[in-house]
Amino acid sequence: MEENRRTQGAGRLIYGKHWIAWLAMAGGAVVIVGALLTWFSLFAGLQPYRGVDVLNGRLLSVGGMLGLVAGGSFLLRGKLWLRWGIGFLGFALLAFASWSLFQLLVLYRQLSTDPMMVAKLGPGHFVVLAGALLIFATFFLSDDCYDLDRFAFVPRVTPQAQNSCVVRGQS
């Protein structure tokens, strides 16, 4: 059990359950912050478009809020279905953010050919992608309480006296 723990700071121990929950909550917060940042701007930054100005950004920010709530629930309850739900939410957010970034790059390429538009990409969508990747990374973390439950039914062998020849089940 000791080898499954990770240390933090001055010897405090953090279990896998806490890593998953905090990573999901941090990823959800990063997705929300990325949706509030500028994704795209025209006229050299005079006309910014934030993520929440469009439907894709609003959907991603709702996904970030779901990541925050799911991470907090997993921290409090630690249910297995919540862990899987967080991982699948991260996958869905990552897939949707990647598709949305691809569409944004297509739009940027079309508008960058016009010299009067002076199109520029903002950092927001890349921040959203990083947050979705954080939530998706929870799939690959080990959760100690479920790892220990697998071994809960292994019978323990008690040490016998040094010179005794006791066969198990017979005394």
Image (cartoon, rainbow, N blue to C red):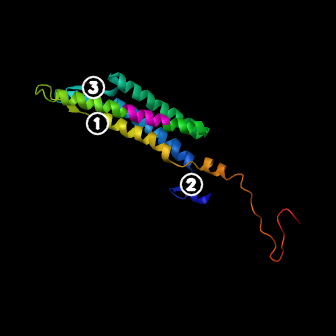
Secondary structure under the numbered disc 1 in the rendered image:
loop
Secondary structure under the numbered disc 2 in the rendered image:
strand
Q: CA distance from mark 2 to mark 3?
A: 43 Å
> Which picture quadrant has residue 72?
top right
Examine the structure image and report whether residue 89 is included in the region drawn in magenta.
Answer: yes
Residue type at the position of mark 1: Pro
Q: Quadrant of the N terminus?
A: bottom right
Q: Quadrant of the C terminus?
A: bottom right
In the rendered structure, find residue 123 and report the number of the disc placed on it. 1
Q: Position of residue 35 (x, y in %)?
A: 36, 30
**Nearer the observer, disc 1 or disc 2?**
1
For mark 2, does the 10 Å Cα neighbourhood hold few (<14), some (14 to 19), or many (20 or more) residues? few
In the rendered structure, find residue 48 and report the number of the disc placed on it. none
Residue type at the position of mark 2: Leu
Total marks placed = 3
In the rendered structure, find residue 49 and report the number of the disc placed on it. 3
Can residue 28 be seen here? The reply is no
> Which picture quadrant has residue 130?
top left
Residue type at the position of mark 3: Tyr
Examine the structure image and report whether residue 75 is included in the region drawn in magenta.
Answer: no
On screen, 81 above or below 165?
A: above
Magenta segment boundaries in residue numbering: 88-96
Residue visible at 52% across and 58% down in the picture: 10
Q: Position of residue 84 (x, y in %)?
A: 54, 38
Q: CA distance from mark 1 to mark 3?
A: 11 Å
Q: Earlier in the sequence, mark 1 or mark 3?
A: 3
Q: Earlier in the sequence, mark 2 or mark 3?
A: 2
Q: Which is more toward the observer, 146 or 43?
A: 146
Q: Earlier in the sequence, mark 1 or mark 2?
A: 2
